[in-house]
């Protein structure tokens, strides 16, 4: 983790702890740290960040597929998620400007959190009130509102997570807590909601999810505004509306990142941009596969909420411990192997049919792998940011890791339908998921190269 002074808005952070300190941290140290109030807040904020993600993406695809929407349309509607990849465009303003109304009472970070959480809830309530029956255009509009607000929430929660950490080891711990909360929300909106929808319908389920955003709002009120970002804002930063201030807000984070990491910056960005590509490519087709293979909402939801939940917790915990004990880069390489490998399990499911033991095994493999890989990437990206530009730099990195995948996944439905013209439907699904696994090889090679060129964290 590098530190430097780039502009007046950038405050030099304390030097990172030595590798020996990181490796000395064991299970007891991690468990004791989990009792800290800010780790609990991070857990709840992670849940709030993860809650809208599936509801505007893969779970929405389940709702649409049950209603008879074709795969190509479901794939294209997944482009609503591009809001998460474009958040770096407005991240400079989140870094430098207080949120309207909320910022006056809660501070910069907490103010943006609260505003975005209210807007996410409004978008989810709108989706519940309209649904596919009112037209896909109106439903997509409310989904876009929720996704835009959710991506803004991600920007500021990521910034808070990095700025609230007192040491590099705590950065890894908070990253694991965030990922755990995030994964719990994914289980709720990718599993429990299916069981609920089978009982009370999709509209009521989405309304309940909107009400659940109160969890994030409560965590925001419990959180403390990071003192370091307050200090950074006071050390001579030019006003945003001035030429110097606007240049520093927009260009400063990019210039600081490339000056800090030099020639390695391009390699870092390339590895990050490809790291989760296989996961994004397969995402929109997972739920349609369950529908077409003959799995009911109740079965999918119950397995995800039981075996899937515990597998997700195990994956996140394993990723967090590896980040502490092995370092960020070695953990990144392991995640680059596990993540794409889990896609092959979906090929097995497509060819085996609605077999409950096989489906359960697929959910275990997928959740362990994605939990580990997600924690590895979050911890690594967090180690690359500079205080004063935290929100913008992390938004830049997370946009790089999502942009290509979120664009290409829009064509996933068309690819499966194209394969379906030459092969049986389930064979087409199997070939598609196997192809997405192969897309992980370039990222693995880049991560290995990155680890060799920078062997020390």
Image: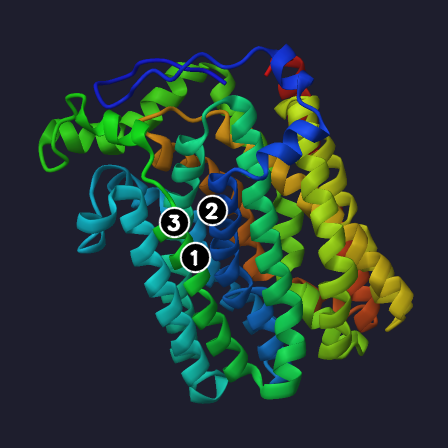
Q: State the CA–CA distance, disc 3 to disc 2.
A: 7 Å
Of marks 3 and 2, which one's residue comes earlier in the chain? 2
Tell me what residue is drawn at x 53 percent, y 36 percent.
174
Mark linked to residue 41 = 2
The image position of residue 254, as x and y in percent, is: 34, 27
Of marks 1 and 2, which one's residue comes earlier in the chain? 2
| Residue under pointer 3 | 222
Look at the image and tell me in which quarter the C terminus lies.
top right
Q: Quadrant of residue 392?
A: top left
| Residue under pointer 1 | 216
Tell me what residue is drawn at x 31 percent, y 14 percent.
5
SS assignment at label 3: helix
Q: State the CA–CA distance, disc 1 to disc 2.
A: 9 Å
Asked whether the beta carbons under mark 1 and mark 2 sit within 8 Å of each other, the answer is: no
* Colour pattern of the rendering: rainbow
Asked whether the beta carbons under mark 3 and mark 2 sit within 8 Å of each other, the answer is: yes
Tell me what residue is drawn at x 76 percent, y 63 percent.
306
Query: How many numbered discs, if any?
Result: 3
Of marks 1 and 3, which one's residue comes earlier in the chain? 1
The image position of residue 343, as x and y in percent, is: 76, 51
Question: Which one is nearer the viewer's eye here, 21 or 36?
Answer: 36
Question: Which one is nearer the viewer's eye here, 240 or 213?
Answer: 213
The image position of residue 139, as x and y in percent, is: 43, 77
Q: State the CA–CA distance, disc 1 to disc 3.
A: 10 Å
Tell me what residue is drawn at x 62 percent, y 39 percent.
375
Q: Indicate whether 241 appears above or below 232.
A: below
Image side of residue 106 versus residue 34, left or right: left
Q: Which mark lies nearer to you, 1 or 3?
A: 3
């Amino acid at each position: 983790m590098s530190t430097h002074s780039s502009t007046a808005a950038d405050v030099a952070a304390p030097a990172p702890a030595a590798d020996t300190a990181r490796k000395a941290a064991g299970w007891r140290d991690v468990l004791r740290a989990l009792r800290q109030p800010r780790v609990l807040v991070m857990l709840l904020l992670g849940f709030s960040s993860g809650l809208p993600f599936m509801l505007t993406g893969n779970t929405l695809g389940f709702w649409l597929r049950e209603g008879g929407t074709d795969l190509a349309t479901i794939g294209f509607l997944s482009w609503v998620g591009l809001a998460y990849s474009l958040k770096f465009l407005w991240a400079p303003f989140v870094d430098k400007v207080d949120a309207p109304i909320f910022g006056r009472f809660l501070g910069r970070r907490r103010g943006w959190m609260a505003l975005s959480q209210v807007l996410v809830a409004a978008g989810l309530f709108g989706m519940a009130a309209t649904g596919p029956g009112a037209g896909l255009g109106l439903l997509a509009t409310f989904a876009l509102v929720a996704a835009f607000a959710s991506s803004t929430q991600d920007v500021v929660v990521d910034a808070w997570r990095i700025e609230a950490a007192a040491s590099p080891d705590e950065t890894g711990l908070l990253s694991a807590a965030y990922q755990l909360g995030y994964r719990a929300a994914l289980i709720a909106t990718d599993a429990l909601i299916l069981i609920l929808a089978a009982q009370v319908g999709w509209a009521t389920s989405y309304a309940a999810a909107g009400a659940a955003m109160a969890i994030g709002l409560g965590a925001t009120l419990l959180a403390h505004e990071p003192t370091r970002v307050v200090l950074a804002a006071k050390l001579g930063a030019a006003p945003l509306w001035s030429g110097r201030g606007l240049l520093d807000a927009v260009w400063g984070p990019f210039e600081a990142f490339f000056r800090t990491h030099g020639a390695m910056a391009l390699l870092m960005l390339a590895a990050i941009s490809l790291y989760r590509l296989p996961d994004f490519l397969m995402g929109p087709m997972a739920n349609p596969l369950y529908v077409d293979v003959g799995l009911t909402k109740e079965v999918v939801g119950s397995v995800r909420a039981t075996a899937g939940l515990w597998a997700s917790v195990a994956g996140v915990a394993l990723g967090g411990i590896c980040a502490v004990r092995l370092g960020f880069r070695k953990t990144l390489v392991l995640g680059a192997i596990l993540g794409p490998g889990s896609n092959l399990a979906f090929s097995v499911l497509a060819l085996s049919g609605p077999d409950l033991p096989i489906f359960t095994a697929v959910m275990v493999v997928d959740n362990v792998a994605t939990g580990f890989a997600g924690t590895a990437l979050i911890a690594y990206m967090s180690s690359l940011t500079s205080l004063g530009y935290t929100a913008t730099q992390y938004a830049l990195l997370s946009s790089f890791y999502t942009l290509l995948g979120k664009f290409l996944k829009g064509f996933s439905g068309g690819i499966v339908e194209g394969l379906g013209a030459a092969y049986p439907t389930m064979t087409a699904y199997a070939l598609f998921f196997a192809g997405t696994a192969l897309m992980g090889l370039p990222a693995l090679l880049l991560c290995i190269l990155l680890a060799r060129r920078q062997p020390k964290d």
